[in-house]
Image: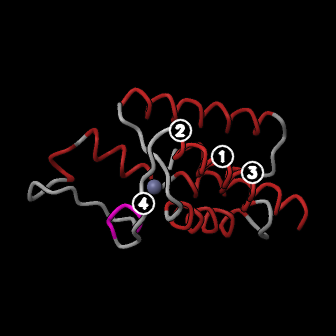
Amino acid sequence: MYCITHFIAGAIIGTAVPGPVSAACAGLVSHAVLDSVPHSEYSRASQGVLDVVCTCLFALGILMAGADVRAIAGGLGGALPDLEVAAAFLFPRAYRPHGRLSLVFPSHSGLIRHRRLVFPWGALTQALAICGLGALFFWAF
Ligand SMILES: [Zn+2]
């Protein structure tokens, strides 16, 4: 999924747990769960850069709006696993020791499998996941 999807989901979930450490852990878990939803990925590096820039701007925006530290921690925990995807793109030799991509996070390594959808359907599933999660947490907390 897109980095901003993981950040928003982690931020939403983070506000429902007692502290920043548990918020970051909940965000991390949410990454694996959300990656199991069929979704689309980038086809160009520029889309990844745009995603990271938008995520940083969103984080800065909610921070300036007075977001709870748990929201920021949850968002960072949710987005953190995608750092290995970015690192694998930037340093391909380090992540392809035997010519095959080797990532660690369960939803990136293939341990947790997920279907891919073409754009725009794969982006729509991400938007629906965020809307559903937001509605659930709005009514529950
Ligand atoms: Zn991921």
Q: Are marks 3 and 1 in contact (CB under 8 Å)?
A: yes
Q: Earlier in the sequence, mark 4 or mark 3?
A: 4
Q: Are marks 2 and 3 in contact (CB under 8 Å)?
A: no
Q: Which residue is mark 2?
A: 120
* Mark 1 lies within 8 Å of ligand 1 (Cβ measured): no
Q: Amino acid at mark 1?
A: Ala
Viewport quadrant of the C terminus: bottom right
Establish if 102 lies above or below 123: below
User: Residue 51: image x %, image y %?
Assistant: 52, 34
Q: Which residue is mark 1?
A: 127
Image quadrant of residue 60? top right
Instruction: Identify the residue at image location x=41%, y=71%.
Output: 112
Mark 2 secondary-structure assignment = loop
Find the residue positioned furthest to the left: 98
Q: Earlier in the sequence, mark 1 or mark 4?
A: 4
Instruction: Identify the residue at image location x=79%, y=60%.
Output: 15
User: Residue 132: image x %, image y %?
Assistant: 75, 57
Q: Earlier in the sequence, mark 2 or mark 3?
A: 2
Image quadrant of residue 108? bottom left
Is residue 136 rendered to the left or right of residue 124?
right
Q: Amino acid at mark 3?
A: Cys
Is residue 99 rendered to the left or right of residue 16?
left
